[in-house]
Image (cartoon, rainbow, N blue to C red):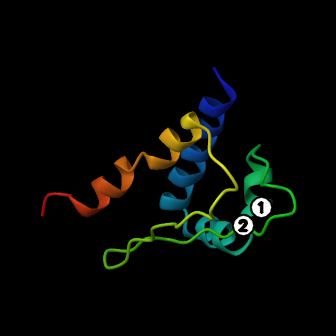
Amino acid sequence: MSDAQDYQRKWGQIVAQAWSDDSFKQRLLADPAAVMAEQGLTAPTGKQLRIVEDTADTVHVVLRAKPDELSDDELDQAAGGAYIAFCFHQPQ
């Protein structure tokens, strides 16, 4: 399993626990770096980390900071809007 797959698996476990345990979710929202560390994930060093929760009425879309320069591979990854398309085109 790659590091990215392991990260995604662990993050999925955190999300599932937040969905089923309100006190865990509140701790995750209040101190994401500490909760992630407890679950074996390292938050970015020297960065502020904020987790926000979507609701039935609100979907958060992140506008990433503009990088200095993107390679073709990085541009392909940044341009993948599959999640956003899913959020805005869900069947009613």
**Mark 2 or mark 1: whose residue is earlier in sequence:** 1
Q: Position of residue 69 (x, y in %)?
A: 66, 50
Of residues 10 and 24, the one nearer the viewer is 10
- Say the numbered circle drawn on residue 33: 1
Q: Residues within 10 Å of mark 2 (few under 14, many from 20)?
A: few
Please, is residue 73 above or below residue 61 in the view? Answer: above
Of residues 61 and 91, the one nearer the viewer is 61
- Say the numbered circle drawn on residue 85: none
Query: Residue 92 lies in what quarter of the image?
Result: bottom left
Q: Position of residue 42 (x, y in %)?
A: 79, 48
Q: Which residue is the extreme one toward the right?
A: 46
Of residues 47 and 1, the one nearer the viewer is 47
Horizontal placement of 33 versus 83: left or right? right
Q: Nearer the viewer, mark 2 or mark 1?
A: 2
- Residue at the image point whose x is 64% and y is 71% from the top: 29
- Residue at the image point whose x is 38% and y is 74% from the top: 55
Q: Position of residue 67 (x, y in %)?
A: 66, 57
- Residue at the image point whose x is 39% and y is 71% from the top: 59
Q: Residues within 10 Å of mark 1 (few under 14, many from 20)?
A: many
Q: Which secondary structure lies at badge 1?
A: helix
Q: Which residue is the extreme one toward the front?
A: 69
Q: Which secondary structure lies at badge 2?
A: loop
- Residue at the image point whose x is 74% and y is 70% from the top: 31
Residue assigned mark 2:
49
Disc 1 marks a residue whose amino acid type is: Ala
Disc 2 marks a residue whose amino acid type is: Leu
Which quarter of the image is occupied by the N terminus? Answer: top right
Distance, label 2 to label 1, CA atoms, is 7 Å
Horizontal placement of 31 versus 11: left or right? right
Q: Contact, CB < 8 Å: mark 2 with mark 1?
A: yes
Q: Position of residue 8 (x, y in %)?
A: 58, 39
